[in-house]
Amino acid sequence: MKIITLILLFAALAGIQKVKAQNANTDSAHAAGMASHDAYRFRLNHSDYKKFTSEHFPASSDYFKPTARYASNAALLIDSVYVQTFRLAAYNKALHQTPHSAGHTLLIGGGITAAAIILLAFIAGPHQKY
C-alpha cells in the first residue's frame, strides 16, 4: 500500500512539473495585446506604400503578415488571433502612414546643420577676458 502511495505521489509531482513547464502566454487577450504592440513598429517601405495607396489592398494581404522581424515572440507567429490582430493593426498603421517628402528631409537636415554651426561658433568663438 505504501509503494502504491509513493508511486502516485511521484506521478503527481511529475505531472505538476510538466504543467509548470508549459508556456501559459498563449491566451487570446495576451496574443492580441502583443500583436497590437508589435504592429506599432510596422512600416511599409516606400515602394510597397506606393502600391498600397494606388491599389488599396486589404488587411488580409501578405504585405501585413507578421514576420520574425516584428514579432517579439516568434512562437506567436502561428497563433491565429495574433496574426489576425497584427494584420489589422498593421493595416491601420499603414493607412495613417505618411511618406517623408524631400522638403521635410531638407528642413530637418537644415535645422540640424544650423544648430551645429551655432554650437561650433559658440564653442570656437573668440575668448576675451573682461
Image (tube, rainbow, N blue to C red):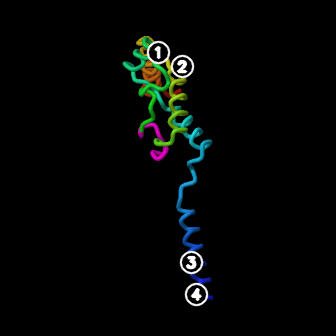
- Front residue (pair 105, 84): 84
What residue is disc 1 on? Answer: 56
Cβ–Cβ below 8 Å for labels 4 and 3?
Answer: no
What residue is disc 4 on? Answer: 3
User: Residue at horizontal 57%, vertical 50%?
Assistant: 25
Cβ–Cβ below 8 Å for labels 3 and 2?
Answer: no
Amino acid type shown at disc 1:
His
What residue is disc 3 on? Answer: 10
Amino acid type shown at disc 3:
Phe
- Regarding mark 2 in the picture, which secondary structure is present there? loop
- Regarding mark 4 in the picture, which secondary structure is present there? helix
Quarter holding residue 9: bottom right
Q: Does the rendering let one see residue 125?
A: no
Q: Earlier in the sequence, mark 2 or mark 4?
A: 4
Amino acid type shown at disc 4:
Ile
What is the CA distance from the residue labelled 1 to the residue labelled 3?
60 Å
Boundaries of the magenta span? 68-76
